[in-house]
Image (spheres, rainbow, N blue to C red):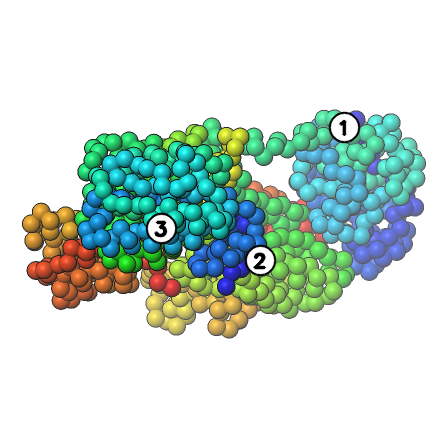
Amino acid sequence: MSQMRQVTDGAEMSSCPSCEEPLESGDLFCGACGFDLSAAPAPAGTDHPTIAINGAAAQGGSPSAAAQGGAPAAAPGGGPQASAAPESAVQWPQAAELDSTDTPAPVLHPGQLRGTDSSGTELSGSTGGAGRDLTGAAGGPAGSDQEQAGGHAPEPDGGAVRYDHPPQPDEYALQAPDPRTQPPAATPPAGTKVCVACRTGTVDQDGYCEHCGHAQPRERDHMERELDHVAAVSDRGLRHHRNEDAFAVSTTALPDGSPAVVAIVCDGVSSATRPDEASAAASQAANESLLASLPRGTHPQQAMHDAIIAAFDAVNSLAQEPARAREHDPHRHQNAPACTIVGSVIAGGLLVVGWVGDSRVYWVPEDRTAPSARLTEDDSWAAQMVAAGLMNEEEAYADERAHAITGWLGADAYELEPHTASFKPDRAGVVVVCTDGLWNYAEGAAEMAAVVPADASERPLHCAQVLVGHALDGGGHDNVTVAVLPFSLAPQGAGSA
Amino acid sequence: MANFSKSNVPQFSVDVYQNEFLPEGGREVNAIVTVTSTGGGTVGGTAVRAYASGSAPDAAVAIMVDCSGSMDYPPTKMRNARDATAAAIDTLRDGVHFAVIGGTHVAKEVYPGGGQLAVADASTRDQAKQALRKLSAGGGTAIGTWLKLADRLLASADVSIRHGILLTDGRNEHESPEDLKAALDACAGRYTCDARGVGTDWEVKEVTGIASALLGTADIVADPSGLAADFTQMMEAAMGKEVADVALRLWTPMGAEIKFVKQVAPTVEELTSRRTEAGPRAGDYPTGSWGDESRDYHVCVQVPNADLGQEMLAARVSLVVPQSDGSVQTLSQGLVRAVWTDDMAASTSINPQVAHYTGQAELAQVIQQGLDARKAGDIDGATAKLGRAVQLAAASGNEDTAKLLAKVVDVEDAATGTVRLKAKVEEADEMTLETRSTKTVRVKK
């Protein structure tokens, strides 16, 4: 049923999928941005995007490329694709949209790039189906017409073969939705939600059980997000009643078409009012700022600096809003909303970090014999003590004041000092961006590296889950938020290690 | 000035003041629930005029005047009662149903008679005042009979607000306490009633008990010449009522237990035992009728223990008013929460409102205990309790109560509660203190 076959006419592949530079027949790399045109048919099983091959190039100039293109073409056989169809039927027009977030090629046309893999589903190369098999299968009633957004009728011997790893039934959803891939009829009416604590009562409008009164999990209690090249997990932890951390992850492209990956993590200051709103506003504002400035060519480090300023402004504007909490409980001591921020951008071979407060970035090289490192310096009492030589690290962190922060985003911050740093790693590894909810349980870089799974680069979400799990196993005394960004030396092959 | 722009449909709001944070193992949740009703009636001297712009009044009032023999000693008492009743009648809005009852060991209809209510207008007000002249003192005192007659008369009108005003000068000597109790039980929830004791020969606990059971106010009018002003004020307050039979509904989760519910402002009124069940884990506590006013309630709930980081709803507080079809309309609601935290600073702080009203409730209690001890001749006990009362009244800024206390004890140091009992105390002063001991003040802003 929901079939995909992906044969496109060679003529269609006339421009670089990354930067849209017109291609010459036979190009192996884009003349403008250097995009590796052969990277496309990377072996199935990796979770990065497939890139269309210029048919003419493959045929005419690059036997190897053609071979690459042909062999894996077998992979996305009809069977696995249909069965692997992920959770829901994303509508066709959205497929293109998704592309832009998880591939380095936001400019791919819908007809060029099939459904995308944001779920990281791995392809199995099981079936022997070849491109033309797929063609046959898909060519059925499922609507080949519609699907040819920009292509020609499939050619049995299709010069260029394109495919995507994760089978995406979406493409035909408009015409012939596969019942198996339809989402369940409808979300159940709110009234039918059953309490997670007692499993008896229904949940009222305020989010409490009507039987035992327990607060129900809120959206922010546990959040996960995974894009290509970055994943993040945030958890309320075991001792706090709400999650005051927030994160934002995204991918975009520099003007040269090379990918840029962004992760922002914020930790609300509990002693302030509405820390949860502060962290959400800050992470979102910083992320949006980076998504606006990076594609314009702003240097990533400057972009990070600007993003922190934008986050600062966003948190400040919260302080001006009439605080419900304030009216409601005038006796609670009032502080302007505040939070920490830490962010990382991987772009153009650079690793840029920026922070205010005590949230951190760690570098964990893929080759664990190489040293790992902490890339940030806390704005905290403990760090200042150590920096001033008044205490050693152990003493400082044992002190109850250790976690008092000396820098934060918020209207009552003395002055904003965004710290940024830029690194050019000479090897592959992963970048761990986290709040103190994690690093309290893995303070040193070596300790952190010990917790990061060996396959972190391939499975960043899994890595983030493992790290959050580590914090929860340790007691989960605070909210825990972790973003993981694999770094590889060849951006286009990122993740294909 | 009257606010003519106000709608006649009151808006209720519920605000909850609490420290929701509990330490590990903590189970007791305290909250002050402030209920404010606005936009209904207006209070004060302009109420009558303000009403002229609205719809027809939807109220009935019965005035019960003590006509027992003791009202003639001194004779000014009866005269003042007559004048006060006349002043109250003048305060009636046009269209309000009313009756005047003369009370002795039996209850008599003074006006209009025939088991009916009159409808207030210029001529009926006049006739009623004429009828008052016939009032004379003679006979005993059986307040239960007055209340039951008032109930019958008030029930004859199809109105939503039913209110009584009761004046007595003596003890309820001509019926048993059980009879009075039975009458109060029969009338409770059917109408509200303010009670006043004139002179000093009446029993404070009887008068406050009547007001408490019928959700009205109680006070002393030691000097009969002050009656007219007091009656006028009471009637104005009654005319300001817009919604009757409002109940405070508390829902609590499975396993939770309500330790107490009390009104703490404007007066302390214990409500815990007055609960009527209202569906699963919910119960209603009567609050009577409401005009433009604000009252505070202290709710204490014991919740089941939960782990650190957990949050639960300890109580859902709503204001409900019954509808003709048997259902209830929810006017407003608020949430009382419990959140367990290991942050000691958060869990150990006491909400200022809770602390304040805990003190006010204790103040009312120690005054009562101190006066009881004094009557029983327990000088040390009385001194300790009233000393504590002086201390609490001073600390919370309850100046009215502090002044009343100063007439019963000589205060050496209010901050520490060091006092000496006065050797000679006017009976009126002691009764005033006892009657008004439950009056509270709100948290200082």
Cα separation between marks 2 and 1: 62 Å
x, y (%) of residue A25? 90, 51
Residue position marked by numbered label 2 in the rendering: B5
Residue located 79% across and 59% down the image: A33
Residue position marked by numbered label 1 in the rendering: A178
Name the secondary structure under disc 3: helix
Q: Which one is closest to the eye, mark 2 or mark 1?
A: 2
Residue position marked by numbered label 3 in the rendering: B85
Q: Which one is closest to the eye, mark 3 or mark 2?
A: 3
Q: Quarter of the image holding residue A307?
A: bottom right
Residue located 23% across and 31% down the image: B178
Letter of the chain that mark 2 sits on in the rendering: B
Q: Does A155 sit left or right of B326 as displayed?
A: right
Q: Are the residues under marks 2 and 1 on the same chain?
A: no
In the image, B45 versus A137, the foreground residue is B45
Q: Of the residues shown, which amino acid type is indicated by label 1? A: Asp
In the image, A464 versus B411, the foreground residue is B411
Do the residues bearing badges 2 and 1 touch, measured as CB atoms within 8 Å?
no
Nearest to N terminus: mark 3 or mark 2 = 2
Residue located 44% across and 59% down the image: B45
Q: Which image quadrant: the C terminus of chain B? A: bottom left
